Amino acid sequence: AQTVTQSQPEMSVQEAETVTLSCTYDTSENNYYLFWYKQPPSRQMILVIRQEAYKQQNATENRFSVNFQKAAKSFSLKISDSQLGDTAMYFCAFMKYNTDKLIFGTGTRLQVFP
Amino acid sequence: GAVVSQHPSWVICKSGTSVKIECRSLDFQATTMFWYRQFPKQSLMLMATSNEGSKATYEQGVEKDKFLINHASLTLSTLTVTSAHPEDSSFYICSARTGPGLAGLGAFYEQYFGPGTRLTVT
């Protein structure tokens, strides 16, 4: 069975600074997706970024980028130039190919301070 | 685009009664919808997957007779919590995706999430 672990329950960062959220996962699969989702206080989950396991290049979306280390089964999220609107819960998630099942980590609560 | 709504956003019901939660895709046709449960300060756990016109597929440990799921159209899925008890109190979130099949190499169909429904059973 696949598991996703987020070891940082809470993080804080000052506005305009950079923060990195950690995620590790365990799987015997070779083909899968990894995701970072944001859940703001409104509770609506938003996809931040996704990575396909077969791609060696790390995914980036504007201020958000990942460091994907397949051998180490590590998938961290870096938020650059943090903004107050980045304050939210961030969930790392795994999905293997040919399924619809998202497996979520326990989340990291990020607080951005002015 | 890709908006998913849920109704109600918050419901309080008495123990032993049933409550229905609706999930709608507002601007796209959802071939597949998903229901998740989120306990306070915890992760989302998939409860079941439903395809339009088919019976839902429940995850292990989820009571199908207690959590009735109906996906009657390409834009509407409902979750009915039957004979609710205080331990059913939780935050229920639905998601929906388009796409003819499952995600695979080069084929990804994003799940769009609703805002959730908070259920409190007294």
Image (cartoon, coloured by chain):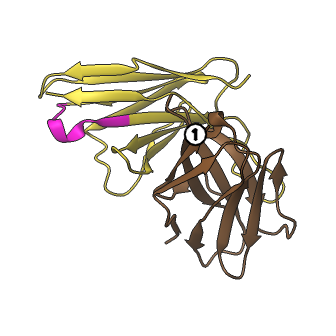
User: Is residue A103 part of the magenta span, yes or no?
Assistant: no
Q: How many labels does the image show?
A: 1
* A13 lies above or below B114: below
In the rendered view, does B119 fall on the left or right side of B47?
left
Give the residue at x 25% y 38%: B66
Quarter of the image with the C terminus of chain B in it: top left
The answer to whether residue B94 is above or below residue B103 is above
Chain A colour in the picture: brown
Q: In this view of the protein, can residue A35 be seen by the observer?
A: yes
For the N terminus of chain B, the quadrant is: top right
Q: In this view, does B10 lie above or below A37?
A: above
| Residue nearest the observer in this picture, B17 or B1 | B1
**What percent of the width, then of the height, locates residue A100?**
60, 51
Residue for point 64% across, 39% down: A86
Q: How crowded is mark 1: few (under 14 residues within 10 Å), some or many (20 or more)?
A: many
Residue A22 in picture, x, y percent from top left: 60, 65
Pointer 1: what residue?
A87
Q: What amino acid does circle 1 point to? A: Thr
Chain under numbered label 1: A
What residue sits 72% from the left and 57% below the top? A78
Residue found 34% across the figure and 45% down from its top? B39
Q: Nearer the viewer, residue B5 or A75?
A: A75
Range covered by the magenta-colored residues? B83-91
Secondary structure category for the residue under label 1: loop
Image location (x, y in percent) of residue B112: 63, 34
Q: Quadrant of residue B64?
A: top left
The answer to whether residue B50 is left or right of residue B3 is left
Residue A65: image x %, image y %?
78, 55
Closer to the camera, A14 or A27? A14
Chain represented in yellow? B
* Residue B85 colored in magenta in the image: yes
| Residue A97 shows up from this direction | no
